[in-house]
Image: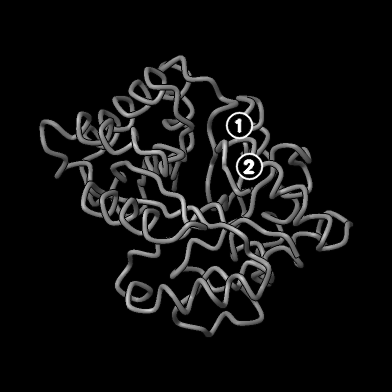
Amino acid sequence: MNLIDTHCHLGDARLRRDVPQALARARQAGVRAVICAAANLRESEASLSLARDYEEVFCMAGVHPHDAKQAPEDYLQQIEQLTAAAENVAIGEIGLDYHYDLSPRSDQRRVFAEQLALAGRIDKPVVVHTREALDDTLAIVRASGADGRRIVFHSFTEGSESVRRVLDLGSAVSFSGIVTFKKMCELRQAARLVPDDRILIETDSPYLSPEPVRKMKTNEPANLTHVARRLGEVRGIPADALAELTTANAIRLFALDVS
């Protein structure tokens, strides 16, 4: 298969000490590139460092809703500096998380809106995290004037009605190992609705190990093959075909140089 993992956390402690081996296993599985996400400024810097060390790694920079309350006054300037690097392909992951509420919702909304404005100003794609907050997420995106075609809703977990609302923005939708879980029938129905040119896949590793390796405590990019196979079954196409179209979408959306 010809795959790109559009969202992983190689800087996480569970993967950081094993990055060379994890990337070697990914290459063997057909994963030609990975995009290393970030939740805060420290992780944004770590992701950039990894991208500079490994040619198949790209990176994002951003402040996750969990970390919104801790964003320093100059966080936007720091993100802008990080996104100027050639290895950076997006601002992310940013958004709203009302499930854990680790930051006050007012801080989450403010930091999300500010980063959307920055992305528009510097012309960077945006990777959005939203959990139990879709109404406010969509409202802030619309109010920002952001181009929905430059937005990816990562590790999507909701059903058909919600995915239609995301698609109405023109946005792309990325699916993780959750789509392989036995009880996620509504999510698989949603996955059938995403147009071929707006679907992506990811591991979100070290989280969300897919079936049939769900008991694996530390997920890794090589397991993207399981997501591709299951999603191909859901959409009625061979896994190789699903891999090719999601890879083409990733290259286009993130302007990846994988030559």
155 left or right, relative to 90: right
Q: Residues within 10 Å of mark 1 (few under 14, many from 20)?
A: many
Circle 2 SS class? helix
Seen at 66% across and 81% down, the residue is: 212
Residue 89 visible, this angle: yes
Residue sticking out furthest to the front: 259
Circle 1 SS class? loop
Residue 95 figure quarter: top left
Residue 95 visible, this angle: no
Q: Which residue is mark 1?
A: 171
2 left or right, relative to 90: right
Q: Position of residue 55 (x, y in %)?
A: 48, 57
**Residue 209 drawn above or below residue 5:** below
Q: Which residue is mark 2?
A: 251
The image's colour scheme reads one colour
Question: Which residue is more in the foreground, 57 or 15?
Answer: 57
Seen at 47% across and 32% down, the residue is: 135
Q: Nearer the viewer, mark 2 or mark 1?
A: 2
Q: Position of residue 60 (x, y in %)?
A: 39, 45
Residue 27 figure quarter: bottom right
**Residue 72 drawn above or below residue 24:** above
Seen at 64% across and 26% down, the residue is: 170
Seen at 43% across and 70% down, the residue is: 206
**What amino acid is labelled 1 in the image?**
Ser
Residue sticking out furthest to the left: 73
Q: Position of residue 106 (x, y in %)?
A: 23, 32
**Residue 168 drawn above or below residue 242:** above
Q: Which mark is first along the chain, 1 or 2?
A: 1
Question: Which residue is more in the foreground, 81 or 144?
Answer: 81
**What amino acid is labelled 2 in the image?**
Ile
Which quadrant holds the N terminus?
A: bottom right
